[in-house]
Image: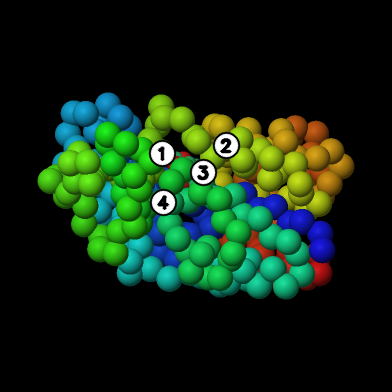
Amino acid sequence: MKTLVVLTGAGMSAESGIKTFRDMGGLWEQYDIMEVASPEGWAKHPEVVLEFYNQRRKQLFESSPNKGHLELAEMEKYFNVKIITQNVDDLHERAGSSNVLHLHGELKKARSTVDPSLVYELDHWELKIGDKCEKGSQLRPHVVWFGEAVPAISEAEKIVKTADIFVVIGTSLNVYPAAGLLWNIPPGIPVYLIDPGEMNITQGLNVTQIKKKASEGIAELKKMIT
Ligand code: APR
């Protein structure tokens, strides 16, 4: 079976009603990244940061995978599918995808602020000041903030190198090191880009853009490669 590596971003979850970051009306038009998604913001006002993620987690508990997530999960019948996602939602997993690597963490998990190896599943949407790990320290969202390291990036680079086909879905490729993964694509393999927006992937790649939303685009891609 050929290996299909897929890099997804916020556009993958847009049809599930989850806001993207940099589109019109996106999250970063409403919030200041440094206030709600950085270690500085956390140090200054942890309750503001917790509330930002609580609102997104609450919405996630009320959201479902869209047709695009389901189509991608179904691709496992035809390919060895490896998903690398920048998204912190669990919609790929809930759609049935069995191989998902989260580059930027997971919204439904919390982490100790004194021992990062202590990670807890959250079965409720609210994380509050006073919610502590077993070592007695405040819990924080298990999400990579701006300025923090991306521990999964080297594993992601290795996965990209195994691709026979590479697909990019719903990411503006604005954020590194995630966007830099494209430099690891094996030379000459087909690269598909599913995004309704104007994109310009260069890096000397053999790119076909399917200028559609994720659900339609993945259905079209499936016809092209299966
Ligand atoms: N289907 C497919 N793509 C879509 C759709 C859709 N329905 N709607 C929007 N898009 C595309 C946009 O054209 C854009 O290229 O999704 C992309 C969204 O880009 P961003 O909002 O920048 O999201 P993303 O690339 O995932 O951001 C990367 O930045 O803020 C950080 O950590 C955060 O993981 C995030 C990272």
**Residue occupied by mark 4:** 106
Query: Do the residues bearing badges 3 and 2 touch, measured as CB atoms within 8 Å?
Result: yes
**Residue occupied by mark 1:** 144
Q: Which residue type carries mark 2?
A: Ile
Where is residue 198, by image quadrant?
top right
Residue at x 61% of width, y 55% of height: 83
Distance between the alpha carbons at the discs numbered 3 and 2:
7 Å
**Residue occupied by mark 2:** 153
Q: Which residue type carries mark 1?
A: Val
Distance between the alpha carbons at the discs numbered 2 and 1:
12 Å
Q: Which residue type carries mark 3?
A: Leu
Where is residue 81, by image quadrant?
bottom right
Q: Which quadrant, please, contains the C terminus?
A: bottom right
Q: Nearer the viewer, residue 95 or 9?
A: 95
Q: Position of residue 24 (x, y in %)?
A: 42, 48
Question: Quick one: label 2, few (<14), some, or many (20+) residues within 10 Å?
Answer: many
Residue 103 image label: 3
